[in-house]
């Protein structure tokens, strides 16, 4: 059987604000990313934060949405894919130059209203808006274009996941790719708890995120691959990463030496930094130990450590019967934060993956996954009507 990897990127700006213009934050790195995928001859799916474009337009800011639309159309033209990423707070955001005045109470779909019926209507409205926007935009480039896959902003399928899932299905979505098995993130903004999701490679979800639905009903889940290393494993992984970096820097292999990274923006829960846009510097040893202990849980969001991403993928896939069953998993990226070190690691990761799994692994678009599901008897919303 085949292992399907869905390379994907959340196509979005920094949600708190940006330190440079939108081209520099999003358009240019995505251009480099698309070029890399062309070079590797594999498809990439961009999960487009549609509500940001609409909000810019509402505030008479036309440059960014136009550039973004051209880039998305170009991606489709080149054989890549574009699907829906929804950050509902944009509807409650004032864009003031490069900073955003955000109402973070509305960061999650499931918190848009206290009344269940109103909540359902609001979520469904946003999902339909983003879906028909992409259909209208991209159907002009490829008449077979279908918006069928969804990734929740901030992986936020919760709270009220039953209502979110129902709205997803009723809006015509077929695939969700928001679940990161084992991931828990609770703070003022996020309410992610994926500790209890089904321990299966893929499954259909109806309302409850913890129980797969029967008879191929509901939304098909393509999770992001994740794993938990032991502290020992993590120590070895960190150790080899840092020693490799150290020796490469010493031997003058510039491309592999860590490059100075300019921060381009800040997340929603943060306030802008006044002067230098740099993180506080800790010693390398400090970082090493913090990462060794803190980062035992890993998931595939592109980093600069190709070996760790490869080990994470291998560890994740070991849980499933890849010999007898097709497995679909997602790899995520955030172009806004990607540097040439990320691109280099991504390329190495892909070569490691294809070297190890040989012909058993294939990179596909979400639209291809949906076509396969329909062929294999997925009951879509239209069937059940
Ligand atoms: Zn996002």
Image (cartoon, rainbow, N blue to C red):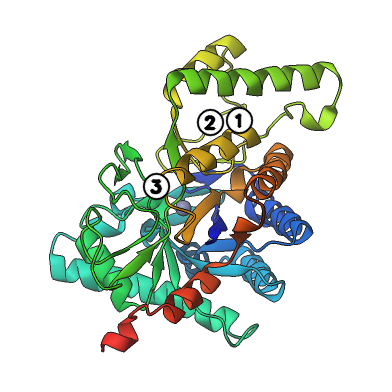
Neighbourhood count class around disc 1 (C-alpha, 10 Å): few under 14, some 14–19, many 20 upward: some
Q: Are marks 2 and 1 in contact (CB under 8 Å)?
A: yes
Image position of 71 with respect to 129: above or below: above
Q: Where, by quadrant of the figure, is residue 302 drawn?
A: top right
* Disc 2 versus disc 3: nearer the observer: 3
Image coordinates of residue 308 in percent, x first then y, are 58, 33
Query: Would residue 305 be visible to someone looking at this image?
Result: no
Q: Where, by quadrant of the figure, is residue 184 drawn?
A: top left
Q: Secondary structure at mark 1?
A: loop
Q: Secondary structure at mark 3?
A: loop
Image coordinates of residue 89 in percent, x first then y, are 37, 56
Res 137 label: none
Neighbourhood count class around disc 2 (C-alpha, 10 Å): few under 14, some 14–19, many 20 upward: few
Query: Would residue 342 be visible to someone looking at this image?
Result: yes
Q: Which residue is mark 3?
A: 180
Q: Which residue is mark 2?
A: 273
Q: Mark 3 or mark 1: which comes first in sequence? A: 3
Q: Which residue is mark 1?
A: 277
Q: Which residue sits at x=40%, y=49%?
A: 154
């Amino acid at each position: 059987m085949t292992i399907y990897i869905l390379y994907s990127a959340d196509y979005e700006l920094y949600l708190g604000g940006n330190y440079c213009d939108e081209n520099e934050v999003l358009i240019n790195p995505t251009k480099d990313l698309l070029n890399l995928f062309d070079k590797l001859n594999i498809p990439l799916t961009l999960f487009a934060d549609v509500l940001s474009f609409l909000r810019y337009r509402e505030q008479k800011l036309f440059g960014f949405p136009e550039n973004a639309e051209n880039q998305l159309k170009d991606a489709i033209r080149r054989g890549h894919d574009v699907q829906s990423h929804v950050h509902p707070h944009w509807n409650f955001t004032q864009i003031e130059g490069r900073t955003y005045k955000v109402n973070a109470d509305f960061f999650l779909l499931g918190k848009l209203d206290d009344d269940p019926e109103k909540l359902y209507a609001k979520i469904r409205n946003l999902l339909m808006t983003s879906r028909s926007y992409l259909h209208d935009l991209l159907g002009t480039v490829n008449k077979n274009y279908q918006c069928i896959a969804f990734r929740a902003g901030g992986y936020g399928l919760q709270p009220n996941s039953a209502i979110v899932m129902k709205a997803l299905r009723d809006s015509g979505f077929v695939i969700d790719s928001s679940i990161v098995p084992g991931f828990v993130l609770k703070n003022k903004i996020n309410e992610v708890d994926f500790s209890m999701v089904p321990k299966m490679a893929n499954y259909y979800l109806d309302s409850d995120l913890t129980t797969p639905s029967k008879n191929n009903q509901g939304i098909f889940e393509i999770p992001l691959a994740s794993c938990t290393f032991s502290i020992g494993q993590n120590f070895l992984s960190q150790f080899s990463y840092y020693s490799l970096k150290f020796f490469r820097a010493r031997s003058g292999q510039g491309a592999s030496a860590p490059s100075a990274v300019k921060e381009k923006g800040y997340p929603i829960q943060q306030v802008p930094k006044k002067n230098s846009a740099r993180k506080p510097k800790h010693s390398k040893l400090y970082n090493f130990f913090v990462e060794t202990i803190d980062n035992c849980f890993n998931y595939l969001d592109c980093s600069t450590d190709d070996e760790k991403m490869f080990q994470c993928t291998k560890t994740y896939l070991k849980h499933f019967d890849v010999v007898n069953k097709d497995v679909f998993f997602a790899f995520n990226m955030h172009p806004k934060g990607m540097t040439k070190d990320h691109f280099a690691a991504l390329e190495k990761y892909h070569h490691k993956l294809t070297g190890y799994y040989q012909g058993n692994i294939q990179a596909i678009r979400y639209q291809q996954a949906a076509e396969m599901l329909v062929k294999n008897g997925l009951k879509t919303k239209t069937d059940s009507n």
